[in-house]
Image: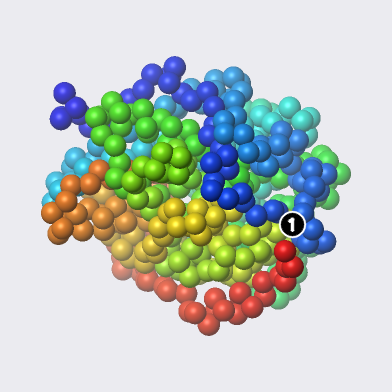
């Protein structure tokens, strides 16, 4: 029967009841997080300025599994479990001997995987009694998800949107505002951090690092009225996404397959972690032979060309310092259309996995991304978000290699969101206006030269 099936579904009763925390199974623990001012290990009180206590507990926890609150699972039922699809038409289009499966997170109300963590973060902030939350967004997927989650829990939401995306993606901005959130192009004149950037560069196109600075400043100066929420990078965020891979395991069992290669695009690391960490547990604990592949833009090559070092999480140096693969907090990426992958660093968990050689990393240029995304959409009928297009590009690389080598691997990837709000990018691609951009090594070295000195 599975020989002809394309879509593999699960009942709502199969929605995971626990998040998986890979910190419990890492061969060595994550490096400590440092206070940006003192450069000493952060305390719970330090983090309490920005986050509610339950989020702090999850951030530092080394428990293997953490229960998902019933209130969160009830909202998850709006779209979970998400489908697992066999990409039979793509396989035929590229003539591969591989089997290709994708977990499709674009069916969520926000159109991406981001709602998987936005819901619990809004829930815990509501429990803590705050008025609202502040955040940043790049491509707008995180801002969309958090505005929806805050609407569900009657919380105020303030979103600093990277200016280039604010201009490129007006409908993303509109949907965030439709859920009642306040959206500001970053850098802005609403914060000291934003005003300082504008004083240096009035035409700054912005970055996630700058937008984080503005959101963190607003929360930190609110006297506890607002907390800060982040859509990627941090441990608790990546853990919330583990439901993706947990569901995929059950669905692939139904398909009678098991992946040889797991692929996800990487910015801060959330959707990649979501599909990958349950399989990495099998690799670490049970010695399973599975390749886990991270894919990033050639224009923001954090894993493939960055360094593993302590760095600030934001441009202004207000957020905690984390040891991560980084291009430097002062790094300003070019305005490529994969706005969600333009962060200067990668989450500590992903960085540690890469440093321990448990995952591989590759970069893909923008034109290959869109060429691959168009191949996918014409075969499968789904428009990938530009971010997800990076995973598609790597999958096609792997599938073509399999044909050349005469192998038949099972490839699983996370199609983390649809591109319905990214059609200006596709339009620019079809008109020949997009270009490839490999970030100059001299510019990377200049940003890395400003890494903070840490004696630990």
Q: How is the image coloured?
A: rainbow
Q: Residues within 10 Å of mark 1 (few under 14, many from 20)?
A: many
Residue 62, how many percent across, how many down?
63, 38
Query: Looking at the picture, does residue 15 appear above or below residue 170?
Result: above
The quadrant in which the N terminus is found is top left
**Residue under numbered circle 1:** 34
Q: Give how far across and how far down residue 122 sits, in percent.
A: 65, 33
Q: Which image quadrant is residue 321 in?
A: bottom right
Establish if 424 lies above or below 51.
Answer: below
- Outermost residue to the right: 223
Residue at point 38%, 50% (across, down): 292
Image mark count: 1
| Residue found at x 48% / y 70% | 305
Residue 245 visible, this angle: yes
- Place of residue 344 in the rendered image (x, y in percent of width and height, measured from the top left): 57, 63
Q: Is residue 8 above or below residue 92?
A: above
Relative to 132, is 344 on the left or the right?
Answer: left
Q: Is residue 188 visible?
A: no
| SS for dot 1 | loop
Instruction: Depth check: give the residue in front, 50 or 340.
Output: 50
Q: Residue at x 54, y 48 (%)?
A: 27
Name the foreground residue: 169 vs 295: 295
Residue 428 image point, x, y percent: 36, 63
What residue is rendered at 54% in x and 55% in y? 352
Q: Nearer the viewer, residue 168 or 227?
A: 227
Q: Residue furthest bottom?
A: 442
Q: Quadrant of the C terminus?
A: bottom right
């Amino acid at each position: 029967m599975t020989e002809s099936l394309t879509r593999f579904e699960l009942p709502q009763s199969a929605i995971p009841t626990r998040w998986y925390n890979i910190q419990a199974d890492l061969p060595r623990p994550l490096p400590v997080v440092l206070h940006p001012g003192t450069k000493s290990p952060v305390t719970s009180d330090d983090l309490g300025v920005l986050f509610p206590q339950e989020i702090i507990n999850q951030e530092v926890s080394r428990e293997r599994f953490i229960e998902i609150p019933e209130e969160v699972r009830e909202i998850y039922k709006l779209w979970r479990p998400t489908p697992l699809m066999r990409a039979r038409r793509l396989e035929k289009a590229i003539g591969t001997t591989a089997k290709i499966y994708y977990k499709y997170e674009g069916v969520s109300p926000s159109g991406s995987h981001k709602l998987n963590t936005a819901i619990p973060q809004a829930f815990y902030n509501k429990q803590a009694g705050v008025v609202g939350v502040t955040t940043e967004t790049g491509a707008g997927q995180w801002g969309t998800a958090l505005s929806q989650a805050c609407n569900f829990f009657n919380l105020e939401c303030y979103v600093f949107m990277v200016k280039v995306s604010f201009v490129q993606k007006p409908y993303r901005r509109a949907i965030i505002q439709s859920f009642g959130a306040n959206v500001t192009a970053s850098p802005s004149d609403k914060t000291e951090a934003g005003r300082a950037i504008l004083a240096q560069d009035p035409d700054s196109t912005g970055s996630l690092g700058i937008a984080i600075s503005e959101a963190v400043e607003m929360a930190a100066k609110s006297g506890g009225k607002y907390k800060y929420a982040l859509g990627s990078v941090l441990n608790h965020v990546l853990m919330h996404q583990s439901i993706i891979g947990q569901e995929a395991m059950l669905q692939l069992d139904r398909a009678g397959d098991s992946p040889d290669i797991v692929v996800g695009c990487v910015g801060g690391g959330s959707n990649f972690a979501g599909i990958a960490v349950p399989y990495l547990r099998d690799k670490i604990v049970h010695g399973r032979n599975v390749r886990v592949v991270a894919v990033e833009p050639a224009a923001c090559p954090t894993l493939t060309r960055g360094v593993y070092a302590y760095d600030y999480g934001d441009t202004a140096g207000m957020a905690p310092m984390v040891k991560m693969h980084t291009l430097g907090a002062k790094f300003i990426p070019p305005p490529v259309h994969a706005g969600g992958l333009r962060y200067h660093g990668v989450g500590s968990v992903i960085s540690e996995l890469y440093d321990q050689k448990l995952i591989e990393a590759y970069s893909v240029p923008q034109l290959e991304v869109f060429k691959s995304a168009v191949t996918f959409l014409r075969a499968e009928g789904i428009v990938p978000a530009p971010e997800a297009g990076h995973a598609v590009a790597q999958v096609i690389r792997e599938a073509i290699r399999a044909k050349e080598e005469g192998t038949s691997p099972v490839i699983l990837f996370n199609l983390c969101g649809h591109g319905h709000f990214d059609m200006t990018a596709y339009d620019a691609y079809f008109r020949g206006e997009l270009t490839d951009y490999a970030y100059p090594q001299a510019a990377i070295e200049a940003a890395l030269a400003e890494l903070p000195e840490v004696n630990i």
